[in-house]
Image (cartoon, coloured by chain):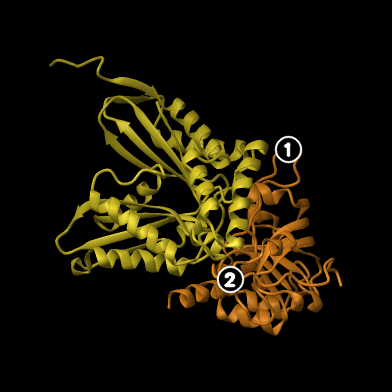
Chain colours: A yellow, B orange
């Protein structure tokens, strides 16, 4: 048997733990350029005085958080981590799950981040913001990509998964997205980003919606022109709702709509909507 | 009366055909706790306010515990009469800081407990998002007021907090009840004692515009 030595790359999980810690601390205190630009653009186009007031404070907050190394929002989220693990990577020094949890524990302690994870029934806080939610995908290559996404509870609570019937089609999807955003109103801290997951199974639609939120804000869906068209139409219709920044009324309710899709069963049309507040935090790195 | 301005800010409309005046926000009304009937009844949904004084943080589990104490016939761990509750759980204070980042959580989750607290004397609430019909009615009945703070600007809002002290339910960590001293804390009136609701008026304006 011939072993393709050299094709496998060792990665110590200690490095992964360190990176996870750094990513969550950084993500909680500063936003990506894409989000900052979208907010500034929103401020320029906002007609409502109260809406502009909210956007001014939102933009000012980004500066203050950076200057004072404080979290942008007191809700520093449940720690969601996407791991894209190259199949030629050999993990050493321990197991991946423990390393990620260690990184999250340290981030929330050392970064003075809020511990927002609890037992669902007793509501007792776990004390260190673990367990993190980890999504692992095996991909080609010998790299490890980590995407840290601290996810706030207020916007997550306004999210939804619905199993539509195939006859409801694209119109049904649009209706459901609009209705979900309308019902949410001021609660998820607009301006929001709307992640839409279409197809797959029930749980995959939800995961697609969450992945859609990790995409750079100014990038439309590249895979399917029907989806980039849907994103454009939904954004327009959502902004026509007039909810506005913080629900105070105005032109900007959504900064972006991102849709992702996968084939589904002939009987089904799952659609998931994952809502992200304006503090759209994500940080990534490749090891 | 603890108001520095004689006239309350006019209600801010969100209809683009009737643009609101920038001075409504720049001339936010300065008010101080404790919130009296007089202060509350002068406020209108849509007013911009800068609040100073003392507020108590309490969110999900603290509300459950206060409610259980009231049901047992015990007093609440903090006096409610004339007080203001801020639905918030701050981040831990880094060294040499008064408080970490602090901002509003979604108020609707507290709705189930709120009418009883208002009937027990609570006058002000700070949070974000819609309230139930029962809460809005209790606000009207008790001449109270519900303010929204801007969500997701917690580093900015932490600058308005001059003192913070845990005073009950310390075991709850971020969810403990804290007494905060605040100065010029920026707020918008959502529900006023006349029963008006800014969020509803915003959506009604949109419907009127589109019909």
Q: Which mark is residue B19?
A: none
Q: Give the Cα distance between marks 2 and 1.
A: 48 Å
In this view, the residue in front, B90 or A99, is: B90
Residue A30: x and y, percent? 56, 39
Q: Is residue A209 visible?
A: yes
Q: Is residue B143 left or right of residue B196?
A: right
Image point 58% across, 71% down: which residue? B18
In this view, the residue in front, B110 or A237, is: A237
Q: Is residue B111 left or right of residue B178?
A: left
| Residue at the extreme front of the image, as rendered | B17
Q: Chain of mark 1?
A: B
In this view, the residue in front, B64 or A279, is: A279
Q: Earlier in the sequence, mark 2 or mark 1?
A: 2
| Residue at the extreme bottom of the image, as rendered | B141
Q: Is residue B178 visible?
A: no
Examine the image and state in which quarter residue A5 appears.
Answer: top left
Task: Find numbered disc 2 in the image and state the secondary structure of the residue it sits on.
Answer: loop
Residue of label 2? B18
Residue of label 1? B95
């Amino acid at each position: 048997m011939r072993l393709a030595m050299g094709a496998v790359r060792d990665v110590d999980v200690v490095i992964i733990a360190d990176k996870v810690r750094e990513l969550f601390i950084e993500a909680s205190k500063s936003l990506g350029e894409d989000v900052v630009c979208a907010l500034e653009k929103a401020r320029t186009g906002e007609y409502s005085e109260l809406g502009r007031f909210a956007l001014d404070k939102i933009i000012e907050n980004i500066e203050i958080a950076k200057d004072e190394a404080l979290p942008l929002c007191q809700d520093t989220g449940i720690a969601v981590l996407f791991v894209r693990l190259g199949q030629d990577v050999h993990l050493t020094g321990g197991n991946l799950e423990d390393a990620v949890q260690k990184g999250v524990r340290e981030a929330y302690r050392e970064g003075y981040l809020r511990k927002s994870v609890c037992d669902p029934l007793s509501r007792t806080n776990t004390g260190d913001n673990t367990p993190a939610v980890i999504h692992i995908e095996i991909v080609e290559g010998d790299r490890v990509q980590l995407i840290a996404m601290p996810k706030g509870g207020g916007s997550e609570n306004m999210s939804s998964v619905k199993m539509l019937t195939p006859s409801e089609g694209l119109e049904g999807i649009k209706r459901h997205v609009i209705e979900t955003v309308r019902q949410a109103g001021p609660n998820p801290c607009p301006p929001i980003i709307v992640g839409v997951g279409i197809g797959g199974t029930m749980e995959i639609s939800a995961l697609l919606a969450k992945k859609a939120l990790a995409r750079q804000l100014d990038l439309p869906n590249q895979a399917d022109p029907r989806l980039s068209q849907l994103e454009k139409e939904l954004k327009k219709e959502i902004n026509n709702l007039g909810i506005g920044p913080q629900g105070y009324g105005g032109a900007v309710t959504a900064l972006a709509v991102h849709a992702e899709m996968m084939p589904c069963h002939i009987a089904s049309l799952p659609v998931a909507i994952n809502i992200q507040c304006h503090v759209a935090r994500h940080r990534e790195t490749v090891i | 009366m603890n108001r520095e301005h004689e006239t309350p800010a006019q209600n801010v409309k969100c209809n683009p055909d009737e643009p609101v005046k920038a001075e409504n926000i720049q001339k936010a009304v300065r008010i101080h706790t404790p919130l009296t009937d007089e202060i509350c009844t002068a406020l209108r949904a849509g007013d911009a306010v800068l609040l100073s004084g003392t507020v108590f943080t309490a969110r999900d589990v603290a509300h459950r515990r206060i409610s259980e104490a009231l049901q047992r016939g015990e007093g609440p761990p903090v006096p409610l009469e004339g007080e203001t509750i801020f639905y918030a759980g701050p981040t831990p204070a880094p060294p040499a800081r008064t408080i970490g980042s602090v901002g509003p959580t979604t108020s609707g989750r507290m709705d189930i407990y709120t009418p009883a607290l208002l009937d027990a004397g609570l006058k002000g609430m700070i949070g974000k998002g819609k309230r139930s019909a029962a809460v809005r009615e209790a606000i009207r009945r008790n001449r109270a007021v519900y303010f929204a703070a801007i969500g997701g600007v917690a580093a900015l809002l932490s600058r308005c907090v001059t003192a913070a002290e845990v005073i009950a339910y310390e075991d709850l960590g971020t969810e403990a009840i804290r007494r905060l001293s605040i100065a010029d804390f920026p707020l918008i009136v959502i529900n006023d004692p006349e029963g008006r609701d800014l969020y509803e008026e915003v959506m009604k304006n949109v419907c009127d515009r589109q019909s």
